[in-house]
Structure formats: structure tokens, C-alpha cells
Image (spheres, helix red, strand yellow):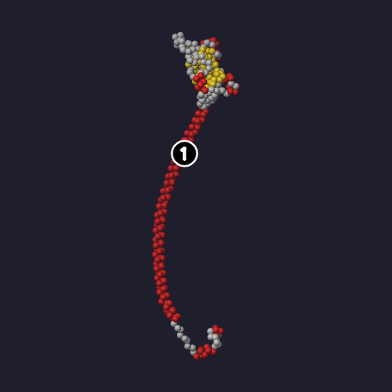
């Protein structure tokens, strides 16, 4: 049965660099050893492995794992495991507190040699600084007994000194998922859903208002139709009354006209009877008045007036 390698043997391994090379005694914590981040990283923005120590101070200080991004790093320490030692990796709790998830295998087979490469994925909305020397991941070592130890096949990843080619090719085509963009899209989607909900509620209210308005319109239209019917009846009654009055006036005028004709005929008749008599009287000769002898003598002695002289015949 495998036996856990404890603090004393871990320190011996660090000091003697037996199965743990490049370690420090301060990284030994009871039953585990804490590996540190090295300066070699693989980040999508560079498209290739780089050494942080070779960057300018300003670029070095701003180097981080962006939200939604995965960055691979190498450990500062190396392993040189014999055929009777295996390791189990345990991510540091502080990484999770910083929003980092560790990617990659957590079991190290016997006969593994070289550095460890560890993937760091930032699931938070805050950048995580890449600082060489920071504690990265813990390892517990187990020693196999003689019956369990054997001539194991050498792992394919043995003697690791840098990132594998397939991982470099992957990062070369890698496009980090920007959580900020996703959050903004999610917020925009929420706003659109809220607006759609508001539109639906508004549309429902509008339909209800329209229905109420339509009902009121129909009611007013019904009242108008009833009023028109009443108006029609009233006008029909008034028309009948006016027609009756017109007929009465027509009868009256007809009677008046007939009476006028009668009067005219009577007048014409009267005129026809009286006019001949007047004409007869005018056409009859007037009798000559006989003068008395004295009146005749007086008239002869009276000198003629101007008017009478003008009527005398000329000599």
C-alpha cells in the first residue's frame, strides 16, 4: 500500500534534490510541497511561449490572466520521480479565491521528469496577476512498496522542459472568451426581455384601452342611431303636419281663386249691362233750351267777349 511522504522526507528530497529539484525548504508544509510559478508562460496575446523576465518592467507588471482567459504556466521546480514515487496535485485555495481554476491532470506518474505545466483559467471578472515565484499548486508524494513498484513505461510527457507543441498550436488559435462581453450581452438581453415584457404589457393595456374605446364608440353609435330614428319619426310627423297645412292652404287658395273668378264675372256682367246704357245716353241729342224774349234781347245787346269774338267768322 502506498505511503505518504511526510515533512522530514520531503525536506530530505529538497535538500538532496532526489525526486524534487530546485525546491525550497520553506515550501514544505507538513504532508505536501507547494510548487511555485516560474517565469515561462503561454498566453494567447503572444501566440507563443515567452519569458516574463525578458519583458520590459511596465509590460511585466501589467501581465495577467484576463477574465474569461486561460493561460498556461510552468513551475519553477522540477520533478525527477523514481519508479516507486508518484504525486497527486492539489490546487491552492488562494487560487480559487482569486477566481482561478486549475486546468490539467492532477496525477503525476512514476518516472516523470521535468517541470509541470499548469493551466490557469480566470472565471472571475477581475484580472489575475501573473507573478513568478507565487505559490501555484501543492503536491503530495506517495511511495510505493516493493510489491507495487515495477518497471513502469516512461510517460510520454517525461523530461518536460517547455510547453508541448500541441498546446502551443492550440493557444496560437485560441480566442479568449471575454466575460465582460458576455455580461454586457447578458445585460443587453435582459434589457431587451424587460423591454419586450413592457411592450407586451403596454400592448395588452393598449388592446384593453382600444376595446373600451371601441365599446364606448359602439355605445355612442347606438345612441346616435336611436336619436336618428327618433328624429326621423319627428320629421315624419312634422312633414305630415306641414303637408296637411299645405293642402288646407291649397284648398283655401283654390276657393279664393274660384270666388275671384265669380266676382270678376259678376263685375264683367255688371259692366256689360251698364256701359251700353251710358253710351246710349251719350249718343242721344240734347234738347235746346227756349229763351224768353227778354233773355234773348239781353243776350243780343251784350257785347261779345274776347272768347266769343274769337269764335266769330272772319269778314
Looking at the image, residue 231 sits to the left or right of residue 115; the answer is left
Residue 198 locus on image (x, y percent):
47, 36
Task: Give the residue at x 52% y 10%.
Answer: 18
Query: Dividing the image into 4 quarters, which one contains the N terminus?
Result: top left
Helix or strand or loop: what does disc 1 sit on? Answer: helix
Residue 132 locus on image (x, y percent):
56, 19
Query: Dividing the image into 4 quarters, which one contains the C terminus?
Result: bottom right
Which residue is at the front of the view, 187 or 156? 156
Which residue is at the front of the view, 151 or 225? 151
Residue position for label 1: 202
Looking at the image, residue 55 sits to the left or right of residue 190; the answer is right
Residue 110 locus on image (x, y percent):
48, 13
Task: Give the residue at x 56% y 23%.
Answer: 63
Few, some or many residues within 10 Å of mark 1 (<14, 14–19, 20+): few
Q: Tell how many labels.
A: 1
User: Does residue 128 appear in this view?
Assistant: no
Task: Give the residue at x 45% y 83%.
Answer: 285
Amino acid at each position: 500500500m502506498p505511503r505518504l511522504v511526510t515533512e522530514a522526507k520531503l525536506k530530505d528530497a529538497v535538500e538532496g534534490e532526489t525526486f524534487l529539484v530546485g525546491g525550497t525548504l520553506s515550501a514544505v508544509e507538513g504532508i505536501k510541497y507547494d510548487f511555485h510559478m516560474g517565469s515561462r508562460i503561454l498566453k494567447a496575446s503572444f501566440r507563443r511561449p515567452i519569458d516574463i523576465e525578458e519583458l520590459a518592467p511596465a509590460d511585466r507588471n501589467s501581465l495577467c490572466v484576463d477574465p474569461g482567459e486561460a493561460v498556461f504556466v510552468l513551475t519553477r521546480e522540477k520533478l525527477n520521480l523514481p519508479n516507486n514515487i508518484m504525486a497527486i496535485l492539489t490546487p491552492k485555495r488562494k487560487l480559487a479565491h482569486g477566481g482561478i481554476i486549475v486546468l490539467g491532470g492532477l496525477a503525476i506518474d512514476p518516472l516523470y521528469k521535468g517541470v509541470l505545466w499548469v493551466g490557469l483559467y480566470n472565471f472571475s471578472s477581475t484580472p489575475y496577476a501573473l507573478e513568478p515565484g507565487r505559490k501555484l499548486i501543492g503536491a503530495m508524494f506517495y511511495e510505493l512498496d516493493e510489491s507495487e513498484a515495477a518497471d513502469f513505461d516512461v510517460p510520454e510527457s517525461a523530461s518536460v522542459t517547455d510547453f508541448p507543441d500541441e498546446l502551443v498550436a492550440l493557444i496560437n488559435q485560441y480566442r479568449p472568451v471575454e466575460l465582460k462581453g458576455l455580461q454586457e450581452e447578458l445585460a443587453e438581453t435582459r434589457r431587451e426581455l424587460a423591454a419586450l415584457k413592457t411592450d407586451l404589457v403596454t400592448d395588452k393595456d393598449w388592446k384593453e384601452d382600444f376595446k373600451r374605446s371601441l365599446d364606448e364608440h359602439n355605445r355612442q353609435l347606438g345612441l346616435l342611431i336611436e336619436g336618428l330614428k327618433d328624429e326621423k319619426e319627428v320629421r315624419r310627423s312634422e312633414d305630415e303636419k306641414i303637408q296637411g297645412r299645405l293642402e288646407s292652404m291649397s284648398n283655401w287658395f283654390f276657393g279664393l281663386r274660384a270666388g275671384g273668378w265669380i266676382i270678376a264675372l259678376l263685375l264683367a256682367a255688371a259692366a256689360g249691362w251698364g256701359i251700353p246704357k251710358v253710351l246710349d245716353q251719350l249718343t242721344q241729342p240734347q234738347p235746346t233750351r227756349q229763351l224768353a224774349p227778354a233773355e234773348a234781347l239781353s243776350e243780343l245787346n251784350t257785347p261779345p267777349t274776347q272768347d266769343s269774338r274769337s269764335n266769330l267768322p272772319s269778314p
